[in-house]
Image: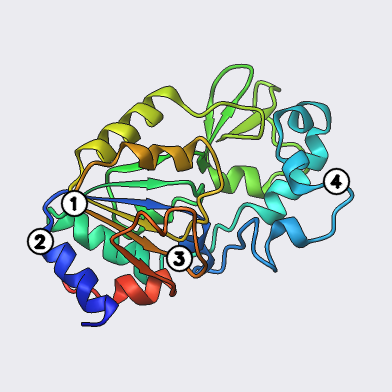
Amino acid sequence: MDKLQELQGMIDESQNIVFFGGAGVSTESNIPDFRSSDGLYNEQYPYPPEQVVSHTFFVKRTEMFYDFYKNRMMFLDAKPNAAHLKLAEMENSGKLTAVITQNIDGLHQMAGSKNVLELHGSVHRNYCQKCGKFYDAKYVKESEGIPRCECGGIIKPDVVLYEEGLNGSTIQNSIRAIAKADMLIIGGTSLVVYPAASFIDYFRGKYLVVINKSGTSRDRQADLCIQESIGKVLGGIHI
C-alpha cells in the first residue's frame, strides 16, 4: 500500500480530524516562509527579520517595521491552494473539526474553512492603538509610511510579534481541539516554533500524520510520515 492510500484509509476511518499547519501550507500559494533557503531569514536586510518583526522594533522604528511588513509579509493577491481547499471540504463534510495555523494570511478562511484558530494572528485585522478602530489589510497595505487612524493614532496589525505572547483563548481552544481529536495531521511546518509546536503533546488519538517536505522532530512518533508537497498530498484525498 502506498502512503497516499494509507492516509486515505486513516481519514476514512476518522471522525474528528484536526489539522495543525505552518508556513509550508502557504508557500504553495507563493507566500515565502521564514526558514527555507529562499525564505525571509536568508534575504539581506540591515536588520535580521526576527528583529524587525519584534515588538521593540515596532515601537522604536515603526516606519521601518511597516516598510518590511507591507513588502514582505502582506500578500493580499495570494489565493488558496489545493491543501486549503481540501481542508475546507473536509470540514464541510463533518470530518475535520479545526484548523490550527501558524500562518497570518487568512487563506484558510478564503478557502471556506470556518473553525480556524490563528495562533499568530492575521494581517486582515488591524486596530488603532489609540481608539481601537478596526482597519482592513488593504488600508494598511496602501497607506503611505506608517498607517494612521483618522483619530491620529498608529494602527497595529493583529499579529503576534516576537516578544509578544500568544492569545490565551486561542491556545486553550487549540489544545482542547487537539486533545479531543482522533486524528491529527501536521502539515507544512518544521515544528521549531514554540510554544505552538508543544501543543502536539496533548494529542491522545489514534493517528498522528506528518506531511512536510523535510523531516521534523515528530517523525518518530508519527504513524505516517509523507515528505512531499502538502497540496499534492491533500489534493489527492477523496472525501
Looking at marks 3 and 4 on the same chain, the residue that comes earlier in the sequence is marked by 4
Please say if the residues under marks 1 and 2 sit with CB atoms less than 8 Å apart: yes
Q: Residue at x 44, y 72 (%)?
A: 227
Q: Are marks 4 and 1 in contact (CB under 8 Å)?
A: no
Which element type, helix, strand or loop, lies under badge 4?
A: loop
Viewer-nearest of discs 4 and 2: 2
Q: Position of residue 171 (x, y in %)?
A: 40, 30
Report how far apart the C-alphas of labels 4 and 2 lie in the structure.
49 Å
Q: Disc 1 marks which amino acid?
A: Lys
Q: Where 3 sits versus 88, above or below?
A: below
- Residue position for label 3: 212
Tell me the mark number nearer the camera, choosing from 1 and 3. 1
Residue 90, located in which quarter of the rendered image? bottom left
Query: Which numbered disc, 4 or 1, marks the residue that appears first in the sequence?
Result: 4
Query: Mark 1 falls on what kind of element?
Result: loop
Can you tell which mark lies on residue 206? 1
Counting residues from the start of the chain, the first of labels 4 and 2 encountered is 2
Give the spatial CA distance, label 4 vs label 1.
44 Å
Label 1 Cα crowd, 10 Å radius (few <14 / some 14-19 / many 20+): few
Q: Where's residue 207, x and y in %?
A: 22, 55
The residue beneath circle 4 is 47
Pick out the residue farthest to the top: 131
Quadrant of the frame with the N terminus: bottom left
Tell me the quadrant of the picture where the C terminus can be found. bottom left
